[in-house]
């Protein structure tokens, strides 16, 4: 437990879980209340795989985003200070989709807004590990267009 949680300034993980669980059953927040927090670091510019598995979605999807712009929640109306304890992961992030098998969220710069609670329950993707994993070799193909090409020594290959 952090110092800010001990003095009552920041919601504990258990308090956040209880707050999310108060959402209607079947909602995204209620689903997120059943998952542990897996990312405690500031997620900006990380590769994060979102927890899009049933019952969050009708079928499992792999959606990887990069959180770019932080969007804090607005304070309750006419309140100068936010009530204590401050809510943990209550804000949102504008994210770029970098990999997706979901038909509504294509990769390649498509932007979505994702709650901080959902990102905090995502899985960090280590790009170095992904790049180091062996890739399948491309299928060997021959075509007539390559016949007669030179191999650089002046003789056809």
Image (spheres, grey):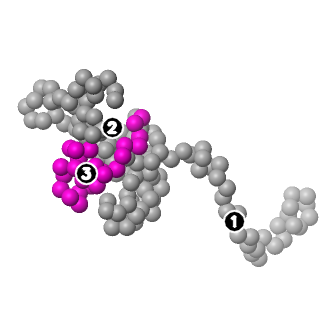
Residue at the spot of label 3: 29
**Along the horizontal axis of the image, is 101 left or right of 92?**
right
Q: Residues within 10 Å of mark 3 (few under 14, many from 20)?
A: many
Residue at the spot of label 2: 70
Residue at the spot of label 1: 138
Q: Tell me the distance, in whole angstroms, between the alpha carbons under discs 1 and 3.
A: 42 Å
Residue 140 at x, y percent in the picture: 74, 70
3 up-or-down from 107: above or below? above
Front position in the image: 104 or 27: 27
Quadrant holding the C terminus:
bottom right
Residue 56 at x, y percent in the picture: 32, 59
Element under label 3?
A: helix
Residue most toward the bottom? 144
- What is the span of residues highlighted in magenta in the rendered image? 17-41
Residue 40 on the magenta span: yes
Q: How many marks?
A: 3
**Along the horizontal axis of the image, is 50 left or right of 15?**
right
Residue most toward the left? 78
Q: Tell me the distance, in whole angstroms, between the alpha carbons under discs 2 and 1.
A: 40 Å
Residue 139 at x, y percent in the picture: 70, 69
- Kindly tell me whether residue 90 is visible in this rendering: no
């Amino acid at each position: 437990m952090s110092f800010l949680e001990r003095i009552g300034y920041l919601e504990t993980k258990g308090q956040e879980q209880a707050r999310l669980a108060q959402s209607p059953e079947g909602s995204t927040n209620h689903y997120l209340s059943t998952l542990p927090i897996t990312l405690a670091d500031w997620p900006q510019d990380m590769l994060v795989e979102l927890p899009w598995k049933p019952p969050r979605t009708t079928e499992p999807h792999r959606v990887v985003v990069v959180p770019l712009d932080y969007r804090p929640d607005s304070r309750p109306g006419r309140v100068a200070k936010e009530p204590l304890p401050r809510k943990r992961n209550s804000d949102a992030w504008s994210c770029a989709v970098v990999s997706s098998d979901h038909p509504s969220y294509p990769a390649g710069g498509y932007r979505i807004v994702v709650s901080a609670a959902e990102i905090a329950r995502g899985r960090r993707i280590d790009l170095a590990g992904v790049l180091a994993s062996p890739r399948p070799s491309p299928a060997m193909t021959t075509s007539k267009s390559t016949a007669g090409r030179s191999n650089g020594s002046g003789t056809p290959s």
